[in-house]
Image (tube, helix red, strand yellow):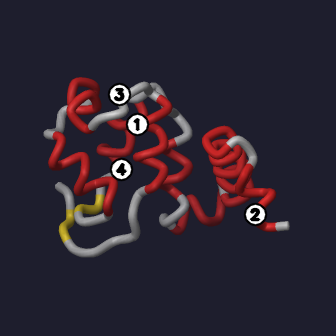
Amino acid sequence: MSYTGTFPPQIYLREARKRAGCSTLEAAAVRVPWSPQAIQRHECGKVRITPQDAVTYAEGYQAPDILPCYCESCPVGQRTGAAYMNQMRNAIFGLVTGGQMESRRQ
């Protein structure tokens, strides 16, 4: 069951979709069992995804890095994997931006 409301945008979902070669929401809907509109609501934070949703996205996009990103908001994920999640996020965004994020910080 998904939760509706206003939640932080799930940027990691959008980035994983693009890395999977799905430049459009319609292309993504072929890989995961949601409509393009539902995928957009997940990515924009209008609907919070469940743990099972995160697994489905990870499998559909062949992007296991979705799971630690999702779990960083969970108390267990915060305690057990914070360092790992930060490393993964930095590596992912470094690949996506071509290292431009680091140069912006300096």
Residue named by callout 3: 60
Residue type at mark 2 is: Arg
- Separation of residues labelled 4 and 1 (CA atoms): 17 Å
Q: Earlier in the sequence, mark 3 or mark 1?
A: 1
Mark 3 or mark 4, earlier in chain: 4
Task: Calculate the distance from the C-alpha at mark 1 to the C-alpha at mark 2.
Answer: 24 Å
The answer to which of 88 and 25 lies nearer the viewer is 25
Is there a contact, CB below 8 Å, between mark 3 and mark 4? no
Q: Which residue appears at 55% of the width and 61% of the height? A: 72
Residue underneath mark 4: 51
Q: CA distance from mark 3 to mark 4?
A: 14 Å
The amino acid marked with disc number 4 is Pro
The answer to whether 30 appears left or right of 89 in the picture is left
* First of labels 4, 2 by sequence position: 4
Where is 65 relative to 10, above or below? above
Q: Residue 84 location in percent, x, y?
A: 71, 50
Q: Which residue is mark 2?
A: 104
Q: Secondary structure at mark 1?
A: helix
Question: Residue at horizontal 80%, vertical 58%?
Answer: 103
Q: Nearer the viewer, residue 16 or 81?
A: 16
